[in-house]
């Protein structure tokens, strides 16, 4: 029998599901949950490798960690009347609303946001959270492909956000898994 790796909730034997999550971002100075997010791409980072040799030992190669880069994150949601995605995407480039003298200038004041990705267990308890720092929109798709032959498809908005790093929020500790009891039968 394998060892249980869920130290905080030892009665849990299976990993957490990937379909229970929420995204929170800073909107007008206060943390706000983003409506309707249905997909978040993986959080990833990669560190380049620096290779070097010593002059006295030309046959051996030494490896050292170099610069770390954090991959972009894609957020998707069904098209709705909440203008939050479009408003944030327009912070980087919005020709119509940028004041003169330079209509191609971006909003340096507030185009970056911190995000929090929260993961929940089957009972709806928050069990994990990741903080994403200084995210900004590098790509925005307002409406997905339209297809008159598509059945049971919905319109999707998506945005790709660049970021300057992420980390797990270690202050989030899962509560004990709830126990459900069946009512007594007659």
Image (spheres, rainbow, N blue to C red):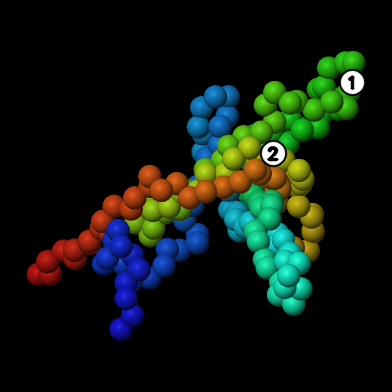
Element carrying mark 1: loop
In terms of depth relative to the viewer, which is nearer, 141 or 8? 8
Q: Is residue 13 above or below residue 8?
A: below
Quadrant location, the N terminus: bottom left
Quadrant location, the C terminus: bottom left
| Residue 71 image position (x, y, % from top left) | 68, 53
Drawn side of residue 101 relative to residue 164, left or right: right
Drawn side of residue 34 relative to residue 4, left or right: right
Pointer 1 residue: 102
Q: Residue at x 79, y 54 (%)?
A: 146
Residue that lies at the very extreme toward the front in this rendered image: 56
**Marks 2/1: CA distance?**
21 Å
Q: Is residue 151 above or below residue 39?
A: below
Q: Residue at x 76, y 43 (%)?
A: 138
- Residue 24 in sight from this viewpoint: yes
Residue that lies at the very extreme toward the left in this rendered image: 186
Q: Quadrant of residue 84?
A: top right
Pointer 2 residue: 136
Q: Residue at x 72, y 40 (%)?
A: 137
| Residue 88 image position (x, y, % from top left) | 69, 34
> Which numbered disc covers residue 29?
none
Upstream in sequence: badge 2 or badge 1: 1
Q: Is residue 50 above or below residue 77?
A: below
| Residue 145 image position (x, y, % from top left) | 79, 55
Element carrying mark 2: strand
Q: How many marks?
A: 2
Q: Mark 2: few, some, or many residues within 10 Å (few <14, many ≥20)?
A: many
In terms of depth relative to the viewer, which is nearer, 125 or 181? 125
Q: Is residue 3 above or below residue 49?
A: below
Q: Residue at x 42, y 63 (%)?
A: 16
- Residue 151 in sight from this viewpoint: no
């Amino acid at each position: 029998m394998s060892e249980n790796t869920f130290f905080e909730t030892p009665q849990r034997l299976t990993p957490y599901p990937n379909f229970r999550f929420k995204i929170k971002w800073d909107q007008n100075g206060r943390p706000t949950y983003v409506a309707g997010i249905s997909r978040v791409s993986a959080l990833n980072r990669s560190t380049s490798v620096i290779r070097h040799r010593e002059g006295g030992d030309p046959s051996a190669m030494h490896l050292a960690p170099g610069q770390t880069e954090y991959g972009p994150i894609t957020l998707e949601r069904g098209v709705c009347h909440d203008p939050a995605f479009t408003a944030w995407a327009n912070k980087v480039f919005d020709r119509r609303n940028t004041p003169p003298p330079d209509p191609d200038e971006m909003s340096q004041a507030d185009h970056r946001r911190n995000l929090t990705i929260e993961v929940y267990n089957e009972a709806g308890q928050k069990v994990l959270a990741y903080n994403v720092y200084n995210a900004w929109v590098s790509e925005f798709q307002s409406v997905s492909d339209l297809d008159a032959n598509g059945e049971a498809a919905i319109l999707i908005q998506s945005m790709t956000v660049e970021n300057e790093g992420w980390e797990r929020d270690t202050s989030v500790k899962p509560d004990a898994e709830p126990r459900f009891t069946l009512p007594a039968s007659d």
